[in-house]
Amino acid sequence: AYPARLDFRFYLAEDGWKVFDVAANGSSAVMHYRQQFRQMMRERMMPYRGYGRR
């Protein structure tokens, strides 16, 4: 096994520090899930494109 770099991103909440993202070797968990969600929405919303546009 090789060493892995882990980066944690925090924010200060009223009740203390909270982790909101973890990146392993530069790959952010938040960005990964955001890309998955965006792709899922693209696939599901494709037939509705154009509605509401002028």
Image: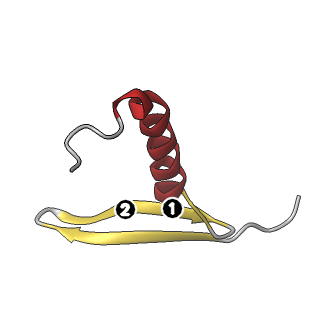
Give the class, few, some or many, for how many residues have Cα within 10 Å of label 2's Cα (few <14, many ≥20): few
Q: Position of residue 25 (x, y in %)?
A: 69, 68
Q: Residue at x 34, y 31 (%)?
A: 48
Residue under pointer 1: 22
Secondary structure of residue under mark 1: strand
Q: Are marks 1 and 2 in contact (CB under 8 Å)?
A: yes
In this rendering, position of residue 15 left or right of residue 17? left
Q: Residue at x 80, y 68 (%)?
A: 3
Q: Residue at x 37, y 62 (%)?
A: 19
- The residue closer to the viewer here, 54 or 39, is 54
- The residue closer to the viewer here, 43 or 10, is 43
User: Where does the N terminus fall, quadrant-wise?
Assistant: bottom right
In this rendering, position of residue 31 left or right of residue 26? left
Residue under pointer 2: 19
In this rendering, position of residue 32 left or right of residue 10? right
Give the class, few, some or many, for how many residues have Cα within 10 Å of label 1's Cα (few <14, many ≥20): some
Q: Residue furthest left?
A: 14
Q: Residue furthest front?
A: 54
- The residue closer to the viewer here, 24 or 14, is 24
Q: Position of residue 53 (x, y in %)?
A: 23, 47
* C-alpha span from label 1 to label 2: 8 Å
Q: Amino acid at mark 1?
A: Val
| 18 over 32 or under it: above or below | below
- Which numbered circle lies on residue 36? none
